[in-house]
Image (cartoon, grey):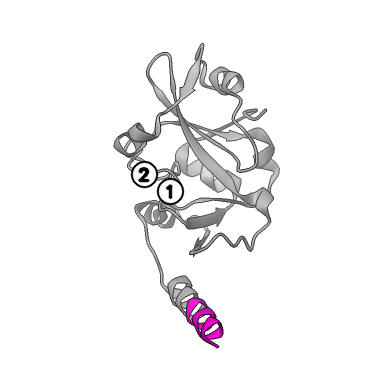
Amino acid sequence: MKYQDSLTSHHRLKKIIMDKTVKTNALRILDKNRISYEAKISIDMEIDHDASLIHKTLVARGVSNELYVFIIPLSNELDLKKAATAAQEKKILMLPEKELLQNTGYLKGGCWPIGMKKQYKTFLELSSTDMEQLIVSGGKVKFRVKLKPEDLMQVVGAKAAKLIK
């Protein structure tokens, strides 16, 4: 009986959190640009969306010392050579996690291209541009946003490029 009670409490808590409107700076930017989106808090690892829609935001540094943002499907790996070609760099390396917050304003797991401290050149995986919608982190850990790829590209000035292995 205790397990059932805790399960019920967990689901009640989840509903309260899900119903609460969370506004990050990034969502305010989407609102200002009149971009349609769905925002959702995930308090556990349940994924109630098609996993192929979920994308991760990666930050890398070129030999020029400039930072770049790459948005790719969660299940894929960034091809550093393709990313360097897209960024017109000879070589790029992933930004160390300890430098992520100071450069972007976001923590690992909550990083997304909208609302970063500085607008870096941003690239979206070419195959993702054909999707009706995609899901990215919403600026906080366990916070997701679903929107159209073209809307995301418009807001951050992203370019489409082949980025994955």
Task: Locate residue 62: give its quadrant.
Answer: top left
Residue 153 lies, in percent from the top left, at 53, 40
Amino acid found under the numbered disc labelled 1: Gly
Q: Which mark is residue 3?
A: none
Query: Residue sitting at 42 percent across and 57 percent down?
Result: 31
Residue 2 on the magenta segment: yes
Question: Does residue 79 sit above or below 156 in this rendering?
Answer: above
Amino acid found under the numbered disc labelled 2: Tyr
Residue 9 on the magenta segment: yes
Q: Which residue is mark 2?
A: 106
- Find the residue positioned furthest to the left: 102
Query: Residue sitting at 41 percent across and 56 percent down?
Result: 27
Which quadrant, please, contains the C terminus? Answer: top right
* Residue 99 as seen in the image, left or right of residue 51: left
Q: How many marks?
A: 2
Query: Residue sitting at 47 percent across and 44 percent down?
Result: 155
Q: Which residues are magenta?
A: 1-10
Question: Does residue 49 sit above or below 74 in this rendering?
Answer: below
Residue 81 lies, in percent from the top left, at 59, 18
| Residue 153 visible (yes or no) | no
- Find the residue positioned furthest to the top: 90
Label 2 near label 1: C-beta < 8 Å?
yes
Question: Does residue 108 sit above or below 93 in this rendering?
Answer: below
Q: Which residue is mark 1?
A: 110
Q: Nearer the viewer, residue 7 or 150?
A: 7
